Image: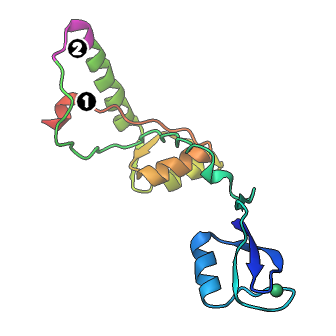
Amino acid sequence: MIRYALNCEQGHTFESWFQNSAAYDKQTKRGLVACPICGSAKVEKAIMAPRLSRAEPADASPPVPMPMPPTPALPVPMPAKAPVSVMSPPERELRKKLKELREHITKNADYVGGRFPEQARKIHYGEIEHRSIYGEASPDEAKELHEEGIEFHPLPILPDEFN
Ligand SMILES: [Zn+2]
């Protein structure tokens, strides 16, 4: 919102609020802005700096960066260029552990596919018995789960899965 001081043809001064300066132009051209004293629709801006209302501080403050939601994804869409690395023995060992973790999850947890958000929510709110599940969630669904405080983790992705 923006406030303008206006003058009518009779020289009356009054103030009026507008959505923005374009709205001011449109409304005065259509004669929709009338002087509250004499009713004249011939008005123009008085020489006075427009004041911005406090209702819209967004213009003044810098954009707030959105926190990135954690990625819960099982199948990651294959990127055009996959990150690659040459691994030395300790890393191979880690990778083996990662593989074990993944295998452990996929062996012991129930695969719920696209019903993951719904199932995770039911477990979180105690509607069904707590158990390990895995499946898929879209970034939006993951964000919602995260905002509800529901804990979940991305499944480890192994490099050779891109091959
Ligand atoms: Zn007037």
**Residue 39: horizontal and vertical position, in percent?**
81, 92
> Magenta includes 122?
no
Q: Which residue is mark 1?
A: 158
Q: Is residue 73 above or below residue 91?
A: below
Q: Of 83 and 73, which appears nearest the observer?
A: 83
Beta carbon at label 2 within 8 Å of ligand 1: no
Q: Position of residue 109 (x, y in %)?
A: 42, 39
Q: What's the amino acid at mark 2?
A: Arg
- What is the magenta range? 86-91
Is 45 left, or right, of 147 in this rendering? right
- Nearest to the observer: residue 37 or residue 64: 37
Q: Is residue 148 above or below residue 48?
A: above
Q: Amino acid at mark 1?
A: Leu
Q: Secondary structure at mark 1?
A: loop
User: How many C-alpha atoms fall within 10 Å of the one at disc 2: few (<14), some, or many (≥20)?
Assistant: few
Mark 1: give few (<14), some (14-19) or many (20+) Cα within 10 Å: few
SS at circle 2: helix
Front-lying residue, 74 or 15:
15
Where's ligand 1: which quadrant?
bottom right
| Front residue (pair 95, 26) | 26
Report if residue 87 lies within the magenta region. yes
Q: Residue furthest left?
A: 163
Query: How far apart are the alpha carbons under marks 2 and 1?
Result: 11 Å
Which residue is at 42% across, 42% downward? 72
Q: Of the numbered discs in the image, which one, if any, rests on residue 92?
A: 2
Question: Quarter holding the N terminus?
Answer: bottom right
